[in-house]
Amino acid sequence: MKRLVPALLFLLSATTLTAQPSASAIIKRLTHAGVTKVEVVKTVKEWKDGKYIYVAYANVIKAVAPEKVFGLKGVSLVIATMAYYDIGASQPYQVLGSESNGEYRGINLPVPSNAELTKFATEAAQKSPEKFFMQAYSIVAIEKITVTDPKAEWLHPGKLKFEGTMVYVDRLTRETFQRMQAPCTIELHRESLNAPWYIGKAAAATMEARYTGDIIHAADAPQWANLPSLSDRVAEKQNSEKLEAMGITAPPVFASGKQLAMHINEKLLQLSKEQFAEYMKLLLHSSLRQQGTSFTPNGNGQQLINSTVMAAYDGWGKYKDQYCPVPGRFDSIGVTVFWYNKRNDGKCDVNAVKDGDTYAIGGIHIFLDKNQQDDAALKAIPCGGEAAAGSGPASPVASVVFKKGDKVWVEENGKWYPATVLDVKPGEWYIHYDGYSSQYDLWVGPARIKSK
């Protein structure tokens, strides 16, 4: 008998150490201010972090103040809670559960009909298809969303969740399309009971998508042929937001190629390298952009942007140092417009092509003197008047006049060479370097020519 008593005490002790927490103990621990009820769902023994523990799963129900749910009364919030207990512990060492992940009960509001939800979801999806897809580079259109679950779920008086089936159009090649069908989930959000709905969250299960119908050729689907893909739309939106953040708006309509050239000159003087690279996308001719988009250039357009920005902003010679806000001279040959630097001995040009009701960039070339000495000399020339005291050499005298056959000196890389004037036009002279091949003949401005 004396030996049996210690054994019974040991067994009782072991039972106490391994007993799982009771439902009443869990309820008592999870009940606090504002909690109206605790529902214990289950308590299980689980292996966690190298040991066995008890995990109590419970719903903690709290009353919700009417002001938090647009004035509705009798609404409660159900918080899915997990309480973690060491074996034999009377109190949990961790409790997880957040109101932000809670679900509302008691929202007695009418739910829109399936027809209403179908109409709204389809229109909203067509307007903002990017909300449904994380990666959908080839999708060009959403045709329809049909509500499949008649039991729409209130997540909050301002959040209504429901399931649907989406039919969308996928671009297989530049000439072919295919309809796809996939399940989707939609959350409608609103800011008050009387505010309009909008899509707050949406997702299409593209992994479950299946083809419907036959392949469709572009010739039979003109409504899709020129549409941008979803990835193009996303890129366009991102570029638009980037431009808006930089304070850059869409370009004006240009009545002539000269207006476009003056605008390019103005923006090159005003904008940083990064800003001009973004802004130039707006000025490109439609042939240099991806089909159907306004902002995203294709390979040729991007190459043109890169070369233009590099010429204007990189290395010795910055555009803003060598050109004036109002260039002293413009020339035009066909669709190409030229404008000149401060010395009238270097010029940029733009191929200004009619594009709808405006002129756009079909090609562009930026010329700068790219050595330090020339850049410094041009930078010292003021715009719109005589040089200020101490600001460096005065700007060239425009009244210098030479005629055909005159013998002159012409500057080349800091040295003066004898030359002969072959042709003349206002502010420029076509010269031949004496003793050199005619391949070196060129037009020069007043800063590079002087009497012999």
Image (tube, grey):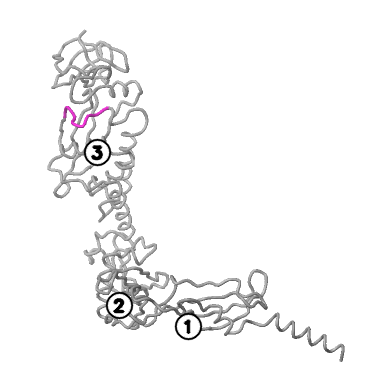
Please tell me whether mark 2 sits on a helix, a strand or a loop. strand
In the rendered image, which residue does mark 2 sit on? 146
Cα–Cα gap, marks 3 and 1: 66 Å
The image position of residue 251, as x and y in percent, is 20, 46
Q: Report if the CB atoms under discs 2 and 1 are less than 8 Å apart.
A: no
Q: Can residue 148 be seen in this view?
A: no
The quadrant holding residue 140 is: bottom left
Q: Report if the CB atoms under discs 3 and 1 are less than 8 Å apart.
A: no
Mark 1 is on which residue type?
Lys
Give above or below for 396 relative to 40: above
The quadrant holding residue 261 is: top left
Please tell me whether mark 3 sits on a helix, a strand or a loop. helix
Mark 3 is on which residue type?
Lys
Give above or below for 182 relative to 273: below
In the rendered structure, find residue 186 and report the number of the disc placed on it: none
Mark 2 is on which residue type?
Thr
In the rendered image, which residue does mark 3 sit on? 267
Q: Considering only order in the chain, which callout, 3 or 2, is on the residue closer to the N terminus? A: 2
Indicate which label's residue lies in the foreground, 3 or 1: 1
Cα–Cα gap, marks 2 and 3: 49 Å
Is the stretch drawn in magenta largely helix, strand or loop? loop
- Residue at x-position 37% and y-position 73%: 185
Q: How crowded is mark 1: few (under 14 residues within 10 Å), some or many (20 or more)?
A: some
Q: Considering only order in the chain, which callout, 1 or 2, is on the residue closer to the N terminus? A: 1
The image position of residue 298, as x and y in percent, is 31, 49
* Image quadrant where one finds the N terminus: bottom right
Q: Which of 199 and 436 is in front in this view?
A: 199
Q: Nearer the viewer, residue 70 or 44?
A: 70
